[in-house]
Amino acid sequence: MNSNWRPDDSFLDTENGEQAGVRRIREVLRKHGFELGQILTSKDKGMEQVVNELERSRMPPGLRQWQLPVAIDGAFAFRTVAEPEAVVPEHSHRANLFRLVVSGTVTYRDVELNPGDWMLVPKGQSYSLRATSKPGFSTQHMYW
């Protein structure tokens, strides 16, 4: 594991009054015939391609993450999937984070979080996570 890994919070950066995350969502949605501000569902034809294009790079080994096409008053949603035993190294974010475990099990310190469990991480607070041996974990989370 590269101990130099840091999360990419650049989606929070603002240029010309618009956050980078909003701009990215808007561009990918338009490319596939959608508009930010319309009703969207994960089942819309073409939405799978939208989400695939919003996959984030520079993740720690064993983890994949997608920015979801959601931007609500400065809040952004993401989905993270981890392989068994994957580790999210100690880090902090420039924004608050709310994480909901959707499947699998993840540990924070000595606390095991299972589907339906959640955690709130205030901006600037340092934390790390570890997926359990099987089947890893999937979380939905929001920054604001």
Image (spheres, rainbow, N blue to C red):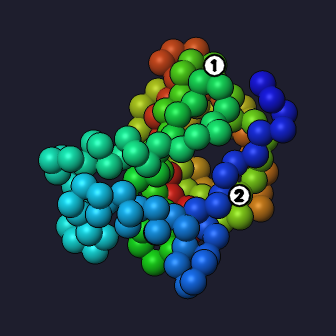
Q: Give the amino acid type for the residue marked by disc 2 in the picture.
A: His
Could one spot residue 118 in this view of the protein? no
Q: Is residue 144 left or right of residue 55?
A: right
Q: Which residue is mark 1?
A: 85
Mark with earlier residue (1, 2): 1
| Residue 96 screen position, x and y as percent | 63, 64
- Image: 111 above or below 96: above
Identified at 40% across, 53% down, the residue is: 68
Q: Nearer the viewer, residue 90 or 5?
A: 5
Which quadrant of the rendered structure holds the C terminus? bottom right
Q: Which residue is mark 2?
A: 93
- Image: 43 above or below 88: below
Quarter assignment of residue 39: bottom left
Question: Hey, which residue is sitting farthest front in the picture?
Answer: 31
Q: Give the amino acid type for the residue marked by disc 1 in the picture.
A: Glu
Q: Is residue 60 left or right of residue 84?
A: right
| Residue 31 screen position, x and y as percent | 29, 58
Quarter assignment of residue 86: top right
Identified at 54% across, 28% down, the residue is: 82
| Residue 131 screen position, x and y as percent | 60, 26
| Residue 113 screen position, x and y as percent | 55, 36
Quarter assignment of residue 19: bottom right
Q: How many marks?
A: 2
Identified at 64% across, 61% down, the residue is: 10
